[in-house]
Amino acid sequence: MNEIDILAIFAHPDDVELTVGGTLLKMKSLGYKTGALDVTKGEMGTRGTVTGRAEEADEAAKILKLDVRENLELPDGHVWLTEETRTKLVRVLRRLKPKVLLTHQIDDPHPDHNHITQIVREAARLASMQKYDGDFGQEKIKVPIVAHNIFSQRVMPSFIVDVSEFSAQKTEAIRAHKSQFYNPESIEPETRLTGKGFIDELENRSRYFGSLIGVTAGEPFYVREALNVEDPIALLTRPMNLYS
Ligand SMILES: [Zn+2]
């Protein structure tokens, strides 16, 4: 049985590590089953090869302790919301049965990222309708909730996950993508991501979002739907060390 609790669906083989690596490590430490679905193989990337990037993704998956890491194999740079892409994702969702999906930010400026938010939101809903792709023989699932990682635009987070304990492992998982980030020995072209300062930038970002809830490192999420809260006192009295 490959069923998981939470699935991170991002465009390129290192996007999961850059955005929600800490949250996935934390969920694993709480006993949940975690997974990543890379939508493309990243073949449009300036650096690296498809095979090399797949090996790096496997290495990073071990560091993130993922139960599942798969690739949807859509063409990098040409990801669109279509009947075919929705159905492909519905089949994965019905097989893995995640309760929560993490994905890119709505209206992310990268077209693949943005189209993936559309595919994820529609597939999440369609997976709950038995007659959609019914001939394929899978059972419908309950609609998984979609939480969008906030990365490229300023959006007020719906919640921030305290990932302070997992910062070092998150960075290690990012560095497993050796072809993509700072490597003084590489002879491939430089990009913004391969500069020395990029990992610092990511750590500063985590520190900033952590500071909003009074912890060392945080990962921010936006949920478009209203949240159903059982106990507002328990929720609202979670420590935010800002006030002490
Ligand atoms: Zn990406």
Image: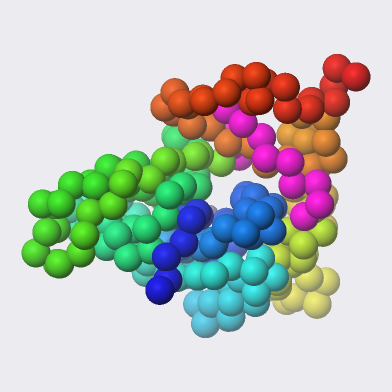
Picture quadrant of residue 162: top right
Picture quadrant of residue 244: top right
What residue is at 23 percent from the left and 54 percent from the top? Answer: 140
90 left or right of 49 in image: left
- Residue 64 visible in the displayed image: yes
In this picture, is 59 found above or below 140? below
The answer to which of 76 and 231 lies nearer the viewer is: 231
In this picture, is 81 found above or below 12? above
In this picture, is 1 found above or below 214? below
Q: Is residue 26 magenta?
A: no
Q: How many marks?
A: 0
What residue is at 62 percent from the left and 31 percent from the top? Answer: 159
Q: Is residue 165 magenta?
A: yes
The range drawn in magenta is 150-166
What residue is at 42 percent from the left and 71 percent from the top? Answer: 2
- Measured as percent of width and height from the top left, residue 178 is found at 70, 72
143 left or right of 171 in image: left
